[in-house]
Image: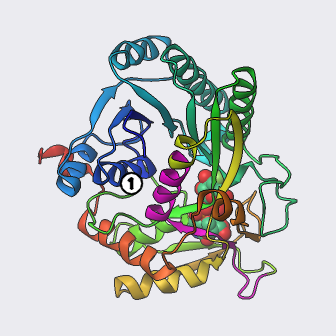
Amino acid sequence: MTSKSIILAGGAGYIGSHIAALMLARDIDIIIIDNFANSSPVVFDRLERITGRRPKLIEADLASAQGAATVLDELRPHDIWGAVHLAGLKAVGESVEQPSRYYDVNINTTLNLINILDQLNATKLVFSSSASVYGAENKSPVSEEGVLSAANPYGSTKILNERLLADHARARSKWQVINLRYFNPVGAHPSGLIGEDPTGIPNNLFPYIAQVAVGRRPHVSVFGGDYDTPDGTGIRDYIHVDDLALGHLAAVDYLTNQNRGDVMPINLGSGHGHSVLEVISAFSRAAGKHIPIELVDRRPGDVAMSFANPSRAEKLLGWAATRSLDEMCRDHWRWQSGNRDGYRAAESNSE
Ligand code: UFG
């Protein structure tokens, strides 16, 4: 692993905070850049409680020219390895309603980060991409050769960012990029101190189930019971956020030991799928609670089945997901039951 500082852009968010916990525990020097648009400063207290170390923070909006200038100034004294880039907007439904905002924030953040790294002579970047880059026509398991075509503006910004980074890497011979295509990240750190804290009504299955189990919502709507799957409900490749974080560490390691310029997409998924009903009963077991459901129509844009072919990650990064669905549910529940309203209570009484 590197002795230089690694930038975690968007490092206070759900996935970034789990990567930060892992890196701090391994004595890796990190600098988090975040504007707390969809994250909480309480994460820093929690990271300190988990690891005994508090990461450096640069609070700035990387999408703006002014924010990027501040970041560059603050980073200049440091010896920078490169960045793990997780900064951006990520709500699929919101991206359909506000496409120009999604393009503006998600593309400008990457453009500014590229420019900052160029100014600092740093050439390594791990990008937080998504399985949403794969068009619905791909058959699961989906490999990195799958056809790219996004069903919504959020997915389009992931495809555009991958292309932007690939073009930049080709133009600068030393640049090395890994585009990590996440399947469905869920779960939380086993300490129960950090986890997913969505604002408003959750769009995704796990946080929705968790909020029903904790009594914040009456029931889970199951979107479609007539898919061509064994129990009729949708199948997805859920991956524990700590497995995902380990995948980022493996990607950083890979780039650290590699001097040749390169750009590569890599799937991070388990290679197995679970149905909506399987997830609900596993969560119910973990929480020891009945979870009421209501079967409703399919959600527009959803496919019956999506899971990864993760063999490239295994071959190149020596990485594979190891945590089971039961562990995902247990850890997600520990976080949600200990933090009913996410970070909100801790925000009002400083820890
Ligand atoms: N589902 C329900 N009820 C809910 C929420 C979801 O039945 O309240 C179902 C969906 O129909 C789907 C499954 O649960 O079958 C998973 O849905 P999620 O919304 O949790 O996840 P998606 O697979 O739709 O999308 C996720 C992320 C995207 C990312 C994509 C990558 O939300 O950001 O995975 O494949 F792009």
Q: Which residue is mark 1?
A: 18
The location of residue 196, given as percent across then percent down, is 40, 56
Vertical arrangement, residue 211 with respect to residue 111, above or below: below
Query: Looking at the image, which is closer to me, 321 or 135?
Result: 321
Residue 141 located within the stretch drawn in magenta = no
The location of residue 309, given as percent across then percent down, is 73, 67
Residue 309 relative to residue 126: left or right: right
Of the residues shown, which amino acid type is indicated by label 1? Answer: His
Find residue 74 and report its image quarter.
top left
> What secondary structure is found at the residue carrying circle 1?
helix
The location of residue 50, given as percent across then percent down, is 22, 57
Vertical arrangement, residue 235 with respect to residue 101, above or below: below
Span highlighted in magenta in the image: 229-252
Query: Looking at the image, which is closer to me, 283 or 315?
Result: 315
Q: Residue at x 47, y 59 (%)?
A: 246
Q: Is residue 118 visible?
A: yes
Q: Residue at x 28, y 66 (%)?
A: 192
Q: Quadrant of ligand 1?
A: bottom right
Scheme by which the image is coloured:
rainbow
Query: Looking at the image, which is closer to me, 316 or 308?
Result: 316
Vertical arrangement, residue 143 with respect to residue 58, above or below: below
The location of residue 168, given as percent across then percent down, is 70, 24
Residue 250 located within the stretch drawn in magenta = yes
Q: Is residue 292 visible?
A: no
Q: Residue at x 77, y 71 (%)?
A: 304
